[in-house]
Image (cartoon, rainbow, N blue to C red):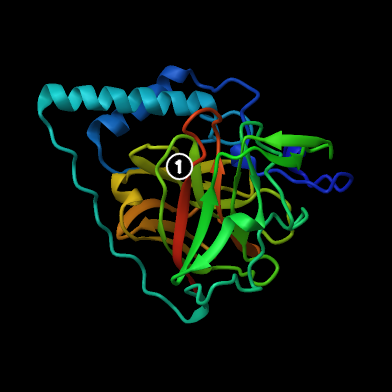
């Protein structure tokens, strides 16, 4: 395990691994990864990658500015290809999700205040304000005031407002924007089960909504990213960070994520993990399965500063867990 991911009990901070900007170059050659991205976007169809991709990503996750540039280039190439060929995007391949079990946790966010079962910052930081120090390009400072409950919905609100916080060394720092996040720690933790989150994502410059799970003992890895979306991309990503430190990832064409409600589902057993967006299978694997208690996080991060960034709201209608 890279020591950078260990909990620093001196400063009492920890890192969100996949938000870290890679320090090393990607191997094999970027051209190989670029080809994969180009093919995925040109075909405009679900792309499932459930094999071990640790050889493709060097150090601390897959959400680097370099990778975002590749995605943008591939998307542009896809658009040109579609104009030249007149092709239409292929429909998503639907798959039948497994049968649900017994409902063990459920909320549809009634009333106007957040239930005490949820916290509004990372467990290892003060609940009055926080951010992910593990990723240098995150621009937001999370505040409880950016978390609202109204009309049976949870709203995580990102605003481009300079906000006072502090850095990983505890020194004062002004962040470009403020936003909201929630976690079920310590109120609800679980091992294995089906997680269903009904949400509507914001599309906008720099916005980075995520639905994910982290270990209850704060020791990373593993990590299960049910859904991550970047800016205005037409795709969404599911990633398993295995206990062995490798990554398995699935990417799907999902431009409708910003309109209407959609269900993001994780099926986690002792021997397998599957992730669905509505009825579309995004990721499926039987290797590197976490065998420990975890908790749920919902957040609206922001990876870009500047005009037009950090402005939007992630809405969550319900969160359910079956076992």
Residue at point 26% right, 41% down? Answer: 45
Q: Is residue 307 shown to the viewer in this render?
A: yes
Q: Nearer the viewer, residue 261 or 12?
A: 261
SS for dot 1: loop
Q: Residue at x 41, y 18 (%)?
A: 31
Q: Position of residue 129 (x, y in %)?
A: 72, 51
Please tell me which residue lies in front, 314 or 73: 314
What residue sits right under mark 1 in the picture? Answer: 51
Q: Is residue 181 above or below residue 195?
A: above
| Relative side of 11 to 91, left or right | right
Judge by depth and name the residue closer to the eye, 64 or 205.
Answer: 205
Q: Looking at the image, which residue sits at the far left? A: 86
Taking the image as shown, residue 110 lies to the left or right of residue 144, namely left
Q: Residue at x 77, y 44 (%)?
A: 6
Give the residue furthest to the bottom: 102
Left or right of 237 in this view: 293: right
Up-down: is 175 above or below 284? above
Residue 133 in the image, given as x and y percentages of width and height: 71, 39
Residue drawn at x 84%, y 36% is 171
Residue 269 seen by the camera: no
The quarter of the picture where residue 162 lies is top right
Q: Quadrant of the N terminus?
A: top right
Locate residue 298: give its quadrant.
bottom right
**Image quadrant assignment for residue 122:** bottom right
Percent across and percent down for residue 201 are: 41, 51
Q: Position of residue 60 (x, y in %)?
A: 63, 35
Rendered view: 322 above or below 96:
below
Q: Residue furthest front?
A: 161
Instruction: Work out whether residue 280 or residue 300 is closer to the camera in this orientation and state it.
Output: 300
Instruction: In the rendered view, tell whether residue 85 sits above or below residue 202.
Output: above
Q: Is residue 86 left or right of residue 157?
A: left
């Amino acid at each position: 395990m890279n020591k950078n991911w260990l909990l620093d009990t001196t400063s009492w901070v920890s890192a969100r691994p996949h938000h870290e900007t890679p320090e090393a170059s990607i191997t094999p050659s970027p051209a190989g990864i670029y080809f994969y991205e180009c093919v995925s976007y040109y075909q405009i169809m679900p792309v499932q990658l459930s094999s071990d991709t640790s050889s493709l990503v060097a150090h601390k996750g897959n959400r680097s500015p370099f990778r975002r540039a590749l995605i943008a280039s591939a998307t542009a190439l896809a658009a040109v290809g579609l104009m030249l060929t007149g092709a239409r995007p292929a429909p998503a391949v639907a798959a039948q999700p497994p049968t649900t079990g017994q409902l063990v946790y459920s909320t549809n966010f009634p009333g106007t205040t957040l239930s005490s079962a949820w916290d509004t910052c990372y467990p290892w930081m003060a609940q009055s304000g926080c951010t992910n120090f593990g990723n240098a390009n995150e621009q937001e400072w999370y505040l409880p005031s950016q978390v609202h409950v109204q009309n049976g919905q949870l709203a995580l609100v990102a605003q481009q407002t300079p906000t006072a916080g502090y850095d990983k060394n505890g020194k004062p720092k002004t962040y470009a924007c403020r936003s909201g996040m929630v976690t079920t720690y310590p109120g609800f933790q679980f091992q294995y089960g089906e997680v269903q989150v009904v949400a509507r994502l914001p599309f906008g410059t720099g916005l980075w909504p995520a639905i994910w799970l982290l270990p209850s003992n704060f020791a990373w890895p593993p990590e299960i990213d049910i859904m991550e979306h970047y800016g205005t991309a037409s795709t969404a990503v599911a990633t398993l960070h295995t206990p062995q430190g490798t990554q398995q990832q699935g990417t799907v064409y999902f431009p409708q994520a910003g309109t209407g409600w959609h269900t993001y589902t994780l099926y986690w057993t002792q021997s397998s993990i599957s992730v669905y967006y509505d009825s579309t299978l995004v990721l499926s694997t039987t290797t590197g399965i976490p065998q420990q208690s975890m908790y749920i996080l919902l957040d609206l991060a922001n990876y870009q500063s500047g005009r037009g960034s950090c402005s939007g709201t992630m809405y969550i209608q319900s969160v359910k867990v079956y076992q």
